[in-house]
Image (cartoon, grey):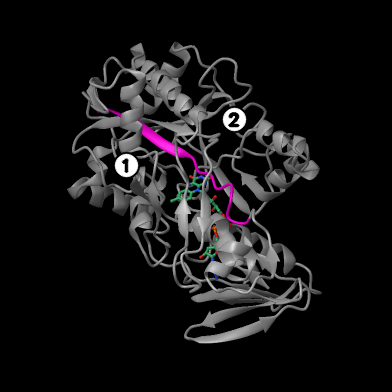
Amino acid sequence: VIVGGGTAGCVLAYRLSESATNTVLLIEAGPPISGLMSRIPAALDFALHDDRFNWCYTTDPEPYMGNRRMSCPRGRVLGGSSSINGMQFVRGNPNDFDSWAAKGLDTWSYSHCLPYFKRMERFQRGGDDYRGDHGPLHVSPASIQTPLDQAFLDAALQAGHGYSEDNNGFRQDGFGLSDKNTYRGRRWGAFDAYLKPALKRENLHVETDCLTHRIIFDKKSAIGVEYDLRGEVIQVYAEKEVLISGGSINSPHLLLLSGIGDTEQLKHHGLPVVQHLPGVGKNLQDHLDLRIQVKCKEPVSHFPSTKGIGRLAAGLRWLVTRSGVCATNLLDVAGYICSRAELEFPNIQSTFMAIAASYDGSHSFAGHGYQAHIDLMKPTSRGSIKLQSANPKKAPSILFNYLQAEEDRRAVIEGFKLTRVLLAQQSFDKFRDGELLPGSSVNTDEEILAWAKVSGETEY
Ligand SMILES: Cc1cc2nc3c(=O)[nH]c(=O)nc-3n(C[C@H](O)[C@H](O)[C@H](O)COP(=O)(O)OP(=O)(O)OC[C@H]3O[C@@H](n4cnc5c(N)ncnc54)[C@H](O)[C@@H]3O)c2cc1C
């Protein structure tokens, strides 16, 4: 029994049902994926607003972000967050995995993970020592879409950064073209790659629109789950095992609802304690995103495709040819950099967009512009997931504690300064028409931090 038909759940269902000796039940809280907008790579803002497919969580007031309740989207649909995400295919830095191994997770070193990374993907440029070309997950390399994308890559070299042929290959550090989870111009998430091909198997059964309420235990062993089968609460028992793949918010939430967690918290909500495990819901972390926006002198950004006839034309082109601006996630070039020299490996993801707009479209500049993102890839601030109620339909309390740690505040300041230097390079001279955000009034460390507090968002 697998709870959660999201990114991991689709892979589990596909791999486990490959063996005829397994009978697999996959239970998903959300609906099957549907609609054109979930297919169009450039329509990320629609995916983020569509509450049919999104848990639409918000955090508790974030104490280091001016007590703002911040948006925390998560997929609630077959394919999970891979059905609503930004489609940027970033494997992670080898050192990330090796540092987990160094902490005792021997089988999570990069060399252990590499065969699985390769087995997973079908990279359009072909396989090599680092990339796979036979897996179910199509990965497409991005291409330069506008002169602004090229200016960004040129600026990186002018500012002294390196170039990487393949950020998911031998060398992550440096700037280059990104990879994306698209295939023939449309989103290619875990549903398309894994679940869809497995649906015809007789030993796989998928339930959608079914919220799992709790895991059923026999003493300390998980033996089944209780879930809401579209209005009727039923119990199902596993012959072999129960797997929880509800994602980083919902998996700990479900464990807590099932009596696995801190005794005091469970008792406070009147839940019977199956196991005192105080770590459940702790150590929550997220990537913070900031962006510097610049007005553009030349009419070369993606802006015309966001409104009126330009938007219609871009949509029609995609419908007919699956190409053009709608076929890209608009995140075509990026870099991975260390915010200061003594760091061993990159802590900042520097993504560029040839448009001045937030991911969800809520803060868009009505004109030609571009923006460089400063994403904290190694946050040290830690938050938590806690119960708000014993009612499984009530969202948990979510707190990331963004910018709690001095190291993260330092990375923001350093990343901001490096990004401004990038955008000031000669390659942008013919495009630059003044900084829109945060603007010339933000310069000192204190001003940068104050701005980060009011404008930072999740990078998921
Ligand atoms: C808006 C957004 C943009 C992102 N952009 C990128 C990107 O560009 N690149 C990148 O690499 N990563 C990105 N990510 C992150 C990435 O998508 C996630 O890390 C990944 O999809 C998580 O996979 P998962 O299997 O852990 O959880 P999910 O894919 O979220 O799956 C969990 C599933 O479990 C279901 N579920 C939860 N609780 C229950 C329950 N009680 N009963 C039944 N079902 C339940 C959920 O509905 C969901 O379908 C983004 C994430 C978001 C939200």
The residues bearing labels 1 and 2 have C-alpha atoms spaced at a distance of 26 Å
Give the answer, above or below, for where 108 lies relative to 230.
above
Ligand 1 lies under 8 Å from the Cβ of mark 2: no
The residue labelled by disc 2 is: 166
Is 439 positioned to the left or the right of 117 in the image?
left
Please provide the residue range marked out in magenta. 280-295
Could you tell me residue 224's position as x and y percent?
Answer: 69, 77
* N-term-proximal mark, 1 vs 2: 2
Give the answer, above or below, for where 410 lies relative to 328.
above
Query: Would you say residue 441 sits in the magenta stretch?
Result: no
Give the answer, above or below, for where 176 lies relative to 24.
above
Could you tell me residue 374's position as x and y percent?
Answer: 42, 30
Could you tell me residue 353's position as x and y percent?
Answer: 37, 34
Residue 372 visible, this orientation? yes
Query: At label 2, which amino acid type do we have?
Result: Asp
Badge 1: residue crowd in 10 Å (few <14, some 14–19, many ≥20)? some
